[in-house]
Image: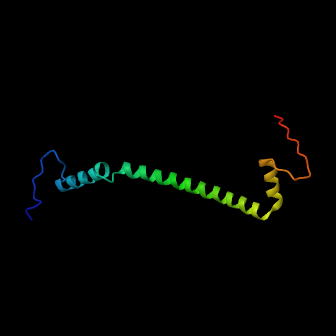
Amino acid sequence: MALFNIQRPKWIPRWLNIPLLIFVAFVVVLLFFGDNNYMRISKYRSQINDLKSQIQNNEDSAAMYDAKVNELNTDNESLERLVREKYGMKRTNEEVFITDIP
């Protein structure tokens, strides 16, 4: 096979041959300079982890709001307390005094 019978210069060690150097250079180019380089992949992985944490936070808050809606739909006392505190509503036969004490 005369294809890979390339004479190596004297300054290159015996164990280091030209096809190995070409292969290592090709791998380095792909890792650091290609379209899917290592830095871009690591940036995408960190973005994916951030988005997964945001999804988890949104699922937790959605579960909290679902529980609150379920409580307001089933418990009339909590619904009445919410309406009185937040919207200042009252029954027809009662007087409400609102004080603003810091």
* Quadrant of the frame with the N terminus: bottom left
Q: At 18% from the left edge and 52% from the top edge, which residue is drawn? A: 14
Q: At 47% from the left edge and 51% from the top edge, which residue is drawn? A: 47
Query: Of residues 12 and 34, which is closer to you in this image?
Result: 34
Kindly indicate the quadrant of the structure image that contains residue 97: top right
Q: Position of residue 33 (x, y in %)?
A: 29, 48
Query: Of residues 65 and 40, which is closer to you in this image?
Result: 65
The answer to whether 61 appears left or right of 90 in the picture is left
Residue at the farthest front position? 92
Q: At 87% from the left edge and 53% from the top edge, which residue is drawn? A: 91
Kindly indicate the quadrant of the structure image that contains residue 99: top right
Query: Of residues 17 and 65, which is closer to you in this image?
Result: 65
The answer to whether 10 appears left or right of 55 in the picture is left
Q: How many marks?
A: 0
Kindly indicate the quadrant of the structure image that contains residue 65: bottom right
The answer to whether 13 appears left or right of 57 in the picture is left
Query: Of residues 55 and 79, which is closer to you in this image?
Result: 79
The answer to whether 20 appears left or right of 1 in the picture is right
Q: Position of residue 30 (x, y in %)?
A: 28, 53
Residue at the farthest left position? 2
Residue 15: in sight, yes or no? Answer: no
